[in-house]
Image (tube, rainbow, N blue to C red):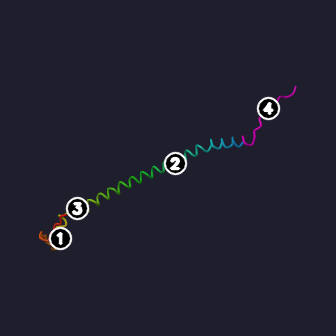
């Protein structure tokens, strides 16, 4: 009686390449997922910082707009004009009607 040897399955080059590619994909896909989540997290942090900067800039703009309105008020203009020696003369005002 002879020793029975198991049949050896012969793989072709294409099949070997397919198995190598599949194993590489299985090993590299978790790394890709971690990398993409890290990138997403970094971008979310940047977005939150930009939102904070936008909020502070909007507050500054609102404050400056209020200051402009205060300085451009008729009472303020009249006070500054009187301090500089100018007088309000109603006769010099001309109204143009369409």
Q: Secondary structure at mark 3?
A: helix
Q: Residue at x 45, y 53 (%)?
A: 46
Label 3 environment density (alpha carbons within 10 Å; few <14, some 14–19, many ≥20): few
Above or below 18: residue 64? below
Q: Which residue is mark 1?
A: 81
Residue 79 is a magenta residue: no
Residue sitting at the far bottom: 85
Cα separation, mark 1 vs mark 4, equals 109 Å
Q: Are marks 2 and 4 in contact (CB under 8 Å)?
A: no
Q: Which mark is residue 70?
A: 3
Q: Which residues are magenta?
A: 1-15
Q: Secondary structure at mark 2?
A: helix
Q: Which residue is mark 2?
A: 38
Q: Which mark is residue 7?
A: 4
Label 4 environment density (alpha carbons within 10 Å; few <14, some 14–19, many ≥20): few
Cα separation, mark 3 vs mark 4, equals 96 Å
Q: Secondary structure at mark 4?
A: loop
- Please state, as top left, top right, bottom left or bottom right, where the C terminus lies in the image: bottom left
Name the quadrant containing residue 8.
top right
Above or below 7: residue 40? below
N-terminal of the pair, mark 1 or mark 4, is: 4
N-terminal of the pair, mark 1 or mark 3, is: 3
Cα separation, mark 2 vs mark 4, equals 48 Å
- The overriding secondary structure of the stretch rendered in magenta is loop
N-terminal of the pair, mark 2 or mark 4, is: 4
Q: Residue at x 37, y 55 (%)?
A: 54
Residue sitting at the far front: 98
N-terminal of the pair, mark 1 or mark 2, is: 2
């Amino acid at each position: 009686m002879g020793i029975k040897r198991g049949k050896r399955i012969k793989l072709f080059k294409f099949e070997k390449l397919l198995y190598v590619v599949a194993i590489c994909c299985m090993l590299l896909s978790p790394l890709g997922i971690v990398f993409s989540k890290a990138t997403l997290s970094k971008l979310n942090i940047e977005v939150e910082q930009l939102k904070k900067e936008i909020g502070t800039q909007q507050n500054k703009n609102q404050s400056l707009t209020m200051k402009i309105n205060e300085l451009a008020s008729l009472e303020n203009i009249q006070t500054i004009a009187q301090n500089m020696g100018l007088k309000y003369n109603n006769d010099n005002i001309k109204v143009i009607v369409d």
